[in-house]
Each structure stands twice: as C-alpha cells, then as structure tokens.
Image (tube, grey):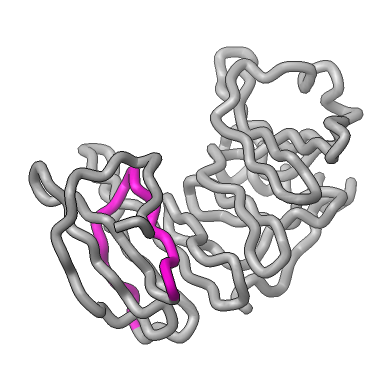
Amino acid sequence: MLFTNMRNVSTKKGLKTVLSKKVTSLHILPLCILFSASLYAEETKLLDATQYVFENKHSTFQVGYKLKNGETITHVLRSDLGGQLTNDSVFEDSIFQITDFAGQTYAIQMDGESFMWTGQGWQVTDFDFDMLTKIISHDQNLVYCSATFPSKAMMNQGRCMGEGWETPQNVFWYDITPEICDNELWVVEPVGSANQLKQFDRFSGKLIKTRSIRFVKPELDVCTF
C-alpha cells in the first residue's frame, strides 16, 4: 500500500502550521486543506461553477470553484446520503480526480498532491504523484497514470505505473482515461486521425500488444474495444 504516513492537518494547530508554511514559501493564497463547513457557511451555499460530482455509497463530493476578489478558489463540498452538506474543503490547486481506492476516498490535485477523506476531513498523504495523475485501479493493487499535457508553458510526459512494476510505461493520453479491463491496463493513444490501443499487464506493467482501433469519444468505455 503506497498511501502511508498520513499527516492530519485538520486540527486547528496543524492547520495554522500548514497555512503559515504555504504563505511564507509559496506566496499564494493558503488553500491546501479543509476548513469546517461552519467557517464557510456563507460561502458554500452556492459554487460559482461545478466541474464534476463524484458519488459513492457514503457520500457525494461536488468539485467546483468560487470567485473571490478576482481569484478562482477550488472547493470540494461533501454531502451525506440525505443531501445534507457536512464539509467544505478548500484546496490550493484544482482537483484532477476524486476516486475510491482500497475502500478509501482520495482526492488528487492537478499538481499531484494527494489527500484521503477520513470521514471528518481530508488528510494530506505523503505520496505525491506526477502532475495530472489519476488512480486507475480500485482494489489493493495500485495502478495510476499521468496525462500528457504538451504546451508552450508546460510539458508533462504521460506515463503509467503500478505496484510491482519495475519501470513506468510512457504513454500518450489526455482526454480518454485509461482503464483496467480483465486484469489488463488499456490505454488509448491518438495517432493522427486514428487511435491505437495499448494493453499492459496490470501486475507487471509489460506491454502485451498494440492494435489500431476506430475513433473513440472520451465518454465511451475503453473496455468495449
């Protein structure tokens, strides 16, 4: 299990320490960890925009942002099964993914910093992913992939990695998220106007085969090909 040595920063003392560090070293608005819903009751009635909603059997997490003093501030609202808002968390970067893994719920920022939901708040984990990373697996064997993001301002080489892999596999993906299909990791890569599907063994990371496929829309299930 790669998520180890959680450090709880939801306490008042811990929160002050983290916020002070963030302001001093990064000179940005300290948004890295949860504030209680009561502190933000006035601001959490509505988000200015909702990016997506993640639901599991315990909670609904609404990811979005509010505009405040010209700044875009990322919020994650947690509601119980009855629809009652129980928590408003503020993060310093956009949330790239919220997902369940091995019975726990995790949030990953775009910069790769990860958090675990405790039922009362978010704990920062000591495991930092590459930027633009998503967890692909949901059981005990961790597989995760970072997206390709080529631009003049930033170049992020997409790759996938998993527990038991000797080395990561470089891949090219950005809008079609890889999936686990019958104990294989399937990655769709754009090649010109077409696509190719790479199939990796999820436990060793070895490439099994590559085949050409028809055009794939991002909302389609990769495992159907």
Rendering quarter of residue 60: top right
The residue that appears at 18% across and 69% down in the rendered structure is 210
Q: From this view, report whether residue 7 is shown above or below residue 75.
A: below
Q: Residue furthest left?
A: 192
Q: Position of residue 156 (x, y in %)?
A: 30, 52
Residue 67, can we see it?
no
The residue that appears at 67% across and 33% down in the rendered structure is 62
Q: Position of residue 137 (x, y in %)?
A: 52, 66
Question: Is 89 positioned to the left or the right of 222 in the image?
Answer: right
Q: From this view, report whether residue 86 is shown above or below residue 112.
A: above
The residue that appears at 34% across and 47% down in the rendered structure is 176
Q: Main secondary structure of the magenta part?
A: loop
Assess whether residue 164 is covered by the magenta stretch: no
Q: From this view, report whether residue 133 is shown above or below residue 163.
A: above
The residue that appears at 72% across and 65% down in the rendered structure is 103
In the image shown, does 77 or 130 lie closer to the viewer?
Answer: 77
Please identify the quadrant where the N terminus is shown. bottom right
Please identify the quadrant where the C terminus is shown. bottom left
In the image shown, does 80 or 65 lie closer to the viewer?
Answer: 80
Q: Position of residue 198 (x, y in %)?
A: 24, 66
The span picked out in magenta is 167-182
Question: Is 115 positioned to the left or the right of 26 in the image?
Answer: right
Q: Residue furthest top?
A: 69
Q: Residue furthest front?
A: 224
Q: Position of residue 55 (x, y in %)?
A: 68, 43
Residue 79, can we see it?
yes
Assess whether residue 180 is covered by the magenta stretch: yes
